[in-house]
Amino acid sequence: MNERRRDHIRVEEKFKSIRNITYDEVMSEFPGTVVKGIDLRTAHLADSWSSIRMPSARLNRSSWEWVKEYPYYQNRPNRFEISLWRDNILCALCYGQTSVSGTRVRMNLIESTPIRPSPLRSRALPIIAFSAAVFADIVGADELWVLDPDPKLEGLYIKEGFSSRATYHGKRVGQRRIL
Amino acid sequence: MIPDPNSKEGKEEIARRVQKRKSELEDVKKRAQNTPDDEPSGKLTSPSEIDRMRDRKNEDI
């Protein structure tokens, strides 16, 4: 095994520990909610939501698929990933990443179940945003971003402590939370 | 600097950072419990295909 591969494994293990600490902390504060990472089965489950037709389901949806994104994120040791479950039902999930400089954590992909009443029995975004902030604090980041937030949901993110829509790195739109 | 989650000092530093964040928990829990079924469902971010490709290629954007 070469040195670069060993470094990759070391970093992967370190961030995996940090994600697990984050999950444990969140679970201890939200009894009944199970917090995990994202495996391939989870990605397939989330993609199956697109076939659910309910009046509560927002029809204006982006086109990405979790299964297609899965291999790319799995290969990023410094990723932020989370899935929220209750009674063995997947309720919400998020993929994000830590910048190489370590000063920013960004949430790139967020989705919650279209099923209502919500099986989570609470809103998903406050828990996901709090979890991402905990993860960002542990890795020493001082900014948390949601990238490419749905423009219609700007107010929703503002309620979670994010700024109005702003430019990220000169080319993307995001909403920032200073930690 | 990222604390080492396997060392005693690292664990203590992580616990300190987590505890600091927990000061906002009361408000987070209130928001989470506020009419949960009114929360918009589905995809809450909308990156373009180009942005997703950029995310896959660039490590430091």
Image: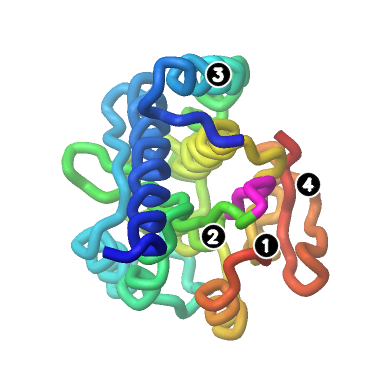
Q: Disc 2 vs disc 1: Cβ atoms closer than 8 Å? A: no
Residue type, mark 2 in image: Leu
Q: Nearer the viewer, mark 2 or mark 4?
A: 4
Q: Secondary structure at mark 2?
A: loop
What is the CA distance from the residue labelled 1 to the residue labelled 3?
29 Å
Q: Which mark is residue B22?
A: 3
The residues tagged by marks 3 and 2 sit, at their Cα atoms, a distance apart of: 25 Å
2 and 4 marks on the same chain: no
Q: Quadrant of the C terminus of chain A?
A: top right
Helix, strand or loop at mark 3? helix
Q: Amino acid at mark 4?
A: Ser
For the question of whether residue A117 can be seen, the reply is no
Question: In this rendering, is residue A152 above or below B48?
Answer: above
**Are labels 2 and 1 on one chain?**
no
Q: Nearer the viewer, mark 1 or mark 4?
A: 4
Instruction: Read off the residue under disc 4.
Output: A163
Which residues make up the magenta segment? A101-106
